[in-house]
Image (cartoon, rainbow, N blue to C red):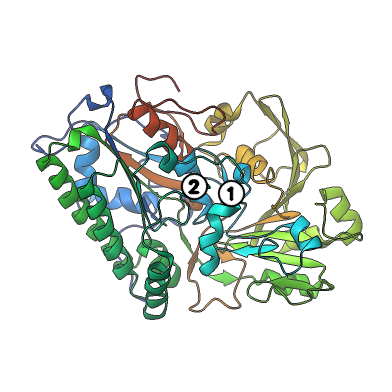
Amino acid sequence: MERGTASFQPAGLSHQTCNLPDASPLPEEPGNPRGPARGAASFARERLFVFLLDGARADTIRDLMDAGELRTLRTLVRGGGTHTEAVTCFPSTTGPAYLPILSGRFPGHLNLPGIRWLDRGAYEVRRWSLDRVRSYVGLESFLMNRDLAPGTITLFDHFPGSANIFSPVSSRNGGPREPTPVRKAALFTYAHYTEHWEAVDGVARLRYSRAVQRGAPFIFGAFLALDELSHHIAPDHERVLRVYRSFDRWLGRLCDRLADRGELDRSAIVVVSDHGMTPVERHFELTTFCEQQGLRTFAYPRVYRHWRDAECAVMVSGNAMANLYLRRKDGWGAAQSYDEIEAAHGRLVERLCARPEVDFVAARDGGGGVIVRSRDGAARIQTSGRSIRHTPLGGDPLGLGACVHRDAETSLRRTWTGRYPDVLVQLLQVFASQRTGDLVVSAGEGSDLRYRYEHPEHRASHGSFQRAHMIVPLLTNLRLRPGPVRTADVCPTLLSAAGRPIPAGLDGRSRLEGQAS
């Protein structure tokens, strides 16, 4: 297989940032008259632009910038902006991982725990309802907005007249959709069967440019070629690297047009990803494993298999994360705790953790927390007010030792440079969703959890707690405060940049330098 020349580090970040979670601005680069003016963050930005490079790796962008190949991005941040790396949410997968960027809230808090899920209550009482199971891979992606928790507010709601380019999430309130569902479905079907995902990005660029031209106050564009090509070829393939370079050249032309109109310095620009990608060497078919344990199991696309007597449902996202649901003796209506699963299913969790493809398994604790188990033992995560406690229970699967973090911000800082960045906060939020599985399975390095029905075969995946899945690039012409950042911080930061109030109850906080979070 052809490989690109850029360095590739499957399990971590580039050498420049492994131990430096610093969002400090880079020094200004001379000779870039089109770059944003230094100190421009001191006034409200009139237009907001988010470019979501789905599946972009933080280390790849840094390596290409260091090689002088992404000149627009380099100019963007050297003119007074910021280049840093952010932690995304769990699951680290397309769709759910858009939510923190657009709403400032984690997917578990918005009841969207993966790209596939089962709703126990609906499954128990309405076997033929659309609401019983979901897969956002395909036409059901158009149902994502209606599946969000009531009251969900996104940046589209804050800025009427906004434009949405290829995001399945707009808002529960019927935000903008571009293009129409029929055109989008036709385009994506063409790309799937021809592998010409660059054409999809071409359409996205055209629509983004038109939205800029008509003066949309907020534009969110999802550029999907990196994700799709990485899945089917490799994250470091030369064809994938060409997509990074092509995007940078187009962004440069767009910034030139904004500068010609006198709008560049009055605009906030954010380039970010929703997740990283790593190569897959081993496919672990989780559905087959459950069947081998004697459980009547269904999964997509055969969701009506055993529809009268199913005992287990497997819903894979990414494909390195899965929600696994187990039927109680009295039906599907309620979730089970770790102790209940152990009592009802014996060594199921132990056998899962023994698989080399599985990194760890998490489940609800009967006391309202989370139990994590792996080959290295078990641990409990609990909350008390704002504080978060991690307690090893024989072994230490997360490698954190016994600790108490004062709040979610402290937890982010304490876990930022570790193997599992933000792991305590992210596991707690995903189990806040009633749709989350009884067990959540996170795949290990080089592995994913699904093989059947994946045509073409996936050669790279995401969705898990692997560091290279959770750490993403974040580049902006805004000056951000130093320190660790979440993608959930993008939404309140943009609201601050626009001089708008930040709603209460967000999981993210403004990182804009000179303003309170």
Q: Residue at x 90, y 58 (%)?
A: 344
Where residue 386 appears, as percent x and y from the top left, is 66, 25
Instruction: Indicate the position of residue 226 as horizontal and vertical percent values.
Output: 37, 62
Please tell me whether residue 280 is drawn above or below residue 435 in the rendered image.
Answer: below
Looking at the picture, tell me which residue is in the foreground, 126 or 298. 126
Could you tell me which quadrant the C terminus lies in?
top left
Neighbor class of circle 2 (other Cα within 10 Å; few <14, some 14-19, many 20+) is many
- Describe the element under mark 1 as helix, strand or loop: loop
Marks 1 and 2 close (CB-CB < 8 Å): yes
**Residue at screen point 19% across, 41% down:** 75
Q: Quadrant of residue 439?
A: bottom right
The quadrant in which the N terminus is found is: bottom left
Which residue corresponds to the image point at 9% horizontal and 37% vertical from the top-left?
A: 33
Asked whether, in this view, residue 326 is left or right of residue 456, the answer is right
Disc nearer the start of the sequence (1/2): 1
Tell which of 400 and 169 is nearer to you.
169
Residue 413 screen position, x and y as percent? 52, 30
**In the foreground, 190 or 398:** 190
Q: Count the numbered circles shown.
A: 2
Residue that carries the numbered disc 1 in the rendered image: 148
204 above or below 267?
Answer: below
Q: Residue at x 46, y 58 (%)?
A: 277
Apparent side of residue 5 relative to residue 314 in the rendered image (left or right): left
Q: Residue 9, position in %: x, y?
A: 42, 55
Q: Which one is in front, 201 or 158? A: 158
The residue type indicated by label 2 comes to: Ser
* Kind of residue at badge 1: Leu
Task: Mark yes or no: residue 486 visible.
Answer: yes
| Any part of residue 18 in sight | no
Q: Which residue is mark 2?
A: 171
Q: Secondary structure under badge 2?
A: loop
Label 1, label 2: how far apart the Cα atoms are: 8 Å
